[in-house]
Image (cartoon, grey):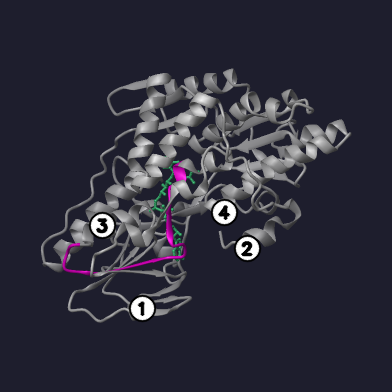
């Protein structure tokens, strides 16, 4: 890998997401050699992926080069590499560009879409976890409308304009809201010769309320906002299969839809060598102690979505969200320094700063630890928080300008089919893109 020997201990971080970057920043000026490995050369700001899928933002504005985050630190090295295996007995990692030795290893590989073994949904449904997947979805949505214009078959036309989003968490809610706004504000102008009023946006939630991780008040308000926008919210229904045209459920309800977006589950991205049963919890997460050490391995740590730290307050681990990943990365940074200096490590304590979701223009819900609010102010808070956590000054400016422009003009100008998505090639394409 062409990384020089150093008198400092080597910390290898796998994954340049929220957790990995926060950790690398903490360690960058310390007496450690930091090697960050990621299969992409950019950090992906996942909370805004739905805006890429719906033409509100260009993909470049939510991605940031990892090399730039830690430019100028002499002890920091980035390698574009897919990690294939961890060999804990020899403290080595196997990657597609060679092997590397570590003194301390941090797994921060995040999570991926969990289809719960349903091959039909996996091969015919759309996921939205990476930028290539979001671009695929953007293309498919637009291609469907182009196709709907061409067909005389009313049933086929309706199916092309019928969207089923499975999962009533923030991703599903935000995507459904954005699609509803497109239907209302953009489609009638773009397709005056198509009856776009027939387009349907269905949000299907297995439980009895959407946004189940938020307060009851936030769930109810978000549902009201969605209904105002014309989204059909289906609760207590589970999608059981999809053949690319028909969505089956555990009830008599079926949907004929050319687009199904699966936002109903994630599982941790595991690594070979750390896949023994003793390490794993529900959802493939790695069980860690309060110092982020994988239980049973002193010099291997895990943070973020991939880690499950079971505490009294969080018996199933912390939520798979950006804040726990960032806070864990920072705490582990401090702890690794302490470990190197032979000082005792500090247990991790999560500071819950609240959660939020936006449904559309002037419509958001915010749950803070001490108070809750919804509506216009919540929407401004949502925008401010997302701009604040977005990495890179240029990205913040571009996103801000886009939002102001979209707000004033009721528009989303990135509705472009740059890389056409052909449904029948879905599996091959996803494999090729190494999503
Ligand atoms: C659509 C969507 C919306 C979301 N919205 C919100 C939100 O509004 N608020 C919120 O708090 N959270 C949100 N989240 C969740 C949040 O993005 C994650 O919790 C967060 O990204 C987890 O950070 P992480 O560092 O654990 O992993 P990630 O940020 O996922 O980073 C993992 C990194 O590891 C790399 N990697 C994985 N495997 C390998 C390998 N084998 N070799 C090399 N590199 C590898 C990946 O390329 C990636 O860069 C959302 C997620 C999605 C998908």
What is the secondary structure assignment of the residue under circle 2? helix
Q: Quadrant of the C terminus?
A: bottom right
Q: Quadrant of the N terminus?
A: bottom left
Gap in angstroms between the C-alphas marked 3 and 4 = 27 Å
- Which residue is at a point 25% across and 81% down the rendered structure image? 5
Residue 279 x/y as whole percent: 39, 63
269 horizontally vs 414: left or right = left
Q: Nearer the viewer, mark 4 or mark 1?
A: 4
Q: Quadrant of residue 376?
A: top left
Dot 4 or dot 1, earlier in sequence? 1
Gap in angstroms between the C-alphas marked 2 and 4 = 11 Å
Boundaries of the magenta span? 29-47
Q: Cβ–Cβ below 8 Å for labels 4 and 1?
A: no
Q: 387 above or below 2? A: above
Dot 2 or dot 1, earlier in sequence? 1
Gap in angstroms between the C-alphas marked 3 and 1 = 21 Å
Dot 2 or dot 4, earlier in sequence? 4
Q: Please name the residue that numbered disc 3 is placed on.
A: 25
Q: Please name the residue that numbered disc 2 is placed on.
A: 431
Q: Please name the residue that numbered disc 4 is placed on.
A: 132
Residue 184 x/y as whole percent: 64, 24
């Amino acid at each position: 890998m062409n990384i020089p020997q150093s008198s400092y201990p080597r910390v290898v971080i796998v994954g340049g997401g929220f957790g990995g970057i926060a950790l690398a920043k903490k360690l960058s000026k310390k007496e450690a050699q930091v090697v960050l490995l990621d299969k992409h050369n950019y950090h992906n700001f996942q909370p805004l992926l739905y805006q890429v899928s719906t033409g509100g933002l260009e993909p470049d504005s939510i991605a940031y080069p990892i090399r730039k985050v830690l430019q100028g630190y002499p002890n920091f090295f980035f390698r574009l590499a897919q990690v294939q295996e961890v060999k804990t007995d020899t403290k080595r990692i196997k990657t597609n560009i060679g092997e590397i030795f570590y003194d301390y290893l941090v797994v921060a590989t995040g999570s991926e879409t969990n289809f719960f073994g349903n091959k039909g949904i996996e091969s015919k449904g759309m996921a939205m976890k990476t930028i290539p997947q979001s671009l695929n979805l953007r293309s498919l949505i637009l291609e469907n409308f182009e196709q709907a214009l061409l067909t005389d078959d009313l049933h086929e036309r309706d199916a092309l304009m019928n969207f089923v989003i499975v999962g009533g968490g923030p991703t599903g809610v935000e995507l459904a809201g954005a699609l509803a706004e497109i239907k209302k504000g953009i489609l009638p102008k773009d397709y005056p010769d198509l009856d776009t009023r027939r387009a349907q946006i269905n949000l299907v939630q297995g439980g009895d309320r959407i946004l189940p991780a938020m307060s009851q008040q936030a769930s109810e308000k978000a549902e009201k906002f969605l209904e105002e926008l014309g989204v059909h919210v289906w609760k207590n229904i589970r999608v059981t299969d999809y053949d690319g045209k028909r969505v089956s459920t555990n009830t008599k309800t079926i949907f004929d839809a050319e687009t199904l977006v699966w936002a109903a589950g994630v599982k941790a991205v595991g690594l070979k060598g750390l896949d023994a049963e003793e390490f794993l919890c529900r959802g493939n997460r790695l069980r860690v102690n309060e110092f982020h050490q994988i239980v049973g391995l002193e010099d291997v740590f895990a943070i973020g979505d991939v880690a499950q730290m079971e505490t009294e307050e969080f018996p199933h681990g912390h939520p798979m969200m950006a804040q726990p990943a960032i806070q864990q990365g920072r705490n582990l940074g401090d702890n690794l320094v302490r470990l190197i200096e032979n000082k005792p490590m500090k247990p991790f304590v999560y500071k819950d700063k609240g959660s939020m979701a936006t449904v559309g223009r002037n419509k958001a819900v915010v749950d803070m630890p001490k108070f809750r609010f919804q509506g216009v102010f919540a929407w401004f808070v949502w925008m401010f928080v997302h701009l604040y956590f977005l990495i890179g000054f240029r990205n913040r400016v571009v996103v801000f300008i886009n939002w102001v422009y979209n707000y004033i003009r009721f528009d989303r100008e990135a509705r472009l089919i740059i890389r056409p998505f052909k449904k029948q090639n879905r599996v091959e394409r996803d494999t090729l893109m190494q999503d």
